[in-house]
Amino acid sequence: MTLKKSVLLAAAMLSVSSVAAHAAGTLEATKERGHVLCGVSPSSAGFAYADDQGKVQGLDADICRAVSAAVFADGDKVEFIPTNTNTRFQALQSGEIDILSRQTTHTFSRDNSLGLNFGPIVFYDGQGVMVPKDLGVESAYDLDGAAVCILPGTTTQQNLSDFFRTNNISFESVVFENTDEWRNAFFSGRCDVLTSDRSDLASTKAVANDPSAYVVLPETISKEPLGPVVRHDDDQWLDILTWSVYALIFAEENGITQANVDEMLNSENPEIQRFLGTTGELGKQLGLNDDWAYQIIKSVGNYGEIFNRHLGPDTPLGLSRAQNKLHTDGGLLYSPPFR
């Protein structure tokens, strides 16, 4: 057999295997494999990054840990697979990953043309621009003629083009294939401006040799609702992802934390009883054990705990909750009822 035929045969076998796994259902395939395949950013401070022990940490990573805890009663049964902006959707479509949890903006086109489904929004964001402080620029409206570092396969280029065109500002796009090239090009002065989601700019600024040398300009030029993604045609897996995210929010709404979740098993609140699985059979409706939500909070805590651990004021990013507060505090986070 020729090398070309061997490659084609291997590709065909992989495709058949992926189709078979999809047909069997992602939950069943995941249980058989023994862990969740989670597509994340190669390195994004606060969202998905390796700590000093090599363990992947961050908000996006903990979303996958929540699903792992729901399925396996163990938040660490996850294999984290780095994906770049060009290949992240293909990795999910092909079955290489079960969940894409990678600061991905929920848009009409992505939801309707890629064969994918978005789970709930886990971070409400917006696109911003960052410049070296010594550039002397105080507003995005002062960037006429600037060279802008951009990543392909993102919403940032169209957003920037729309903003600049609307305001009669010219710019030069300098496109890089991966995050490391994009970041390093900006730090080395190959372009004047770095543009991305404001949270991503905070992540990038945090890893600069001198974060004080850079400033994020005040304008927010787009809406960027970020959420995890799964494939179409597997409603059960989408439901598991969706309600795992809502479990994080519901727990914060009701004061259930990683530290007190065992105590809350004795709550007299009927909805908390159903949520933690001490009464009712909500888990069975997802194909999970009835204590699935308890296992999530025991493993990763509630949404507020995750945010503060990776993104909050006491972290290098130093982000405020802003619109990512609970609805009761003036934010946008809200869980449907568990009944």
Image (cartoon, rainbow, N blue to C red):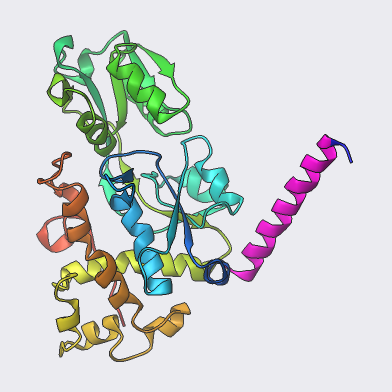
- 273 sits to left or right of 268: right
Is most of the magenta stretch helix, strand or loop? helix
The residue depicted at 20 percent of the width and 85 percent of the height is 265
Q: Position of residue 289 (x, y in %)?
A: 41, 82
Q: Position of residue 163 (x, y in %)?
A: 32, 24
- 271 sits to left or right of 102: left
- 6 sits to left or right of 229: right
Quadrant where the N terminus sits is top right
Quarter of the image for residue 256 reads: bottom left
The residue depicted at 17 percent of the width and 19 percent of the height is 139
The residue depicted at 32 percent of the width and 39 percent of the height is 44
Q: What is the span of residues highlighted in magenta in the rendered image?
A: 3-25
Q: Is residue 120 visible?
A: no
The residue depicted at 24 percent of the width and 31 percent of the height is 207
Quadrant where the C terminus sits is bottom left
Which residue of the protein is positioned furthest toward the front in this rendering?
Answer: 53
